[in-house]
Image (spheres, grey):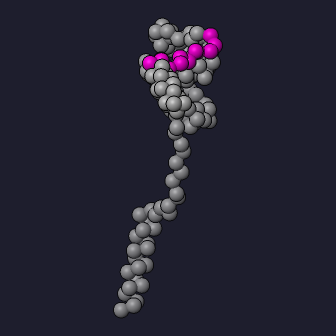
Amino acid sequence: MEQVTQTKHIKKERERIKDCEPPRKNKIGRPSKYGPEIADSINKYLSKSQDQIFNGRTSVNLPSVEGFALFLGVSRDTLYQWAKEHKEFSDTLGRLKAEQFTRLINNGLAGNYSSVITKLLLVTNHGMKEVKEEAHECFSLKKLAERAEALQKSRAGDQ
């Protein structure tokens, strides 16, 4: 009789648990500052991040993730978290990085930016890497003709 009572009690408990909603996770911390206007603020940031020329020297104001975070008053980690949670913001960060990449390439090639800093930023922020080619011995046409002549002479001597 005791086993039947236990079985009924277990069945009732299972039904009660099955009908219950899973416990909700309460968010801890302050509410997010993220809103649709955040993704739109990239245009304002990029317009303020323009290089200036003073007395023939370029004052570089390159857009960056860190600069955008300062502009919004949040941390860099917050930006990356928003990018994980919101597709449109991920696209916004992609646009910022594309703008930085384009400006580094164009101004680096034009000599407006330090080649060392440009290379460093392209390597660290954009996955670029320097490829070193192996040095091959080059022959001038004169040397090539001399080698061909020497080869012909050695073959003639062998016959």
Q: Position of residue 29 (x, y in %)?
A: 63, 13
The residue located at (42%, 68%) in the rendering is: 144
The residue located at (50%, 63%) in the rendering is: 137
The residue located at (63%, 18%) in the rendering is: 75
Main SS category, magenta section: loop
Q: Position of residue 100 (x, y in %)?
A: 51, 25
Q: Position of residue 134 (x, y in %)?
A: 52, 57
| Quarter that holds the C terminus | bottom left
Q: Is residue 127 above or below residue 21?
A: below
Residue 81, picture quadrant: top right
Q: Is residue 115 above or below residue 95?
A: below
Which of the pair 62/42 is nearer the observer? 42
Residue 65 on the magenta segment: no
Which of the pair 93/100 is nearer the observer? 93
Which of the pair 110/80 is nearer the observer? 80
Q: Is residue 121 above or below residue 152?
A: above
Q: Residue furthest front?
A: 1
Is residue 55 rendered to the left or right of residue 105? right
Which of the pair 114/70 is nearer the observer? 70
Please report the bounds of the magenta region as a residue range: 19-30
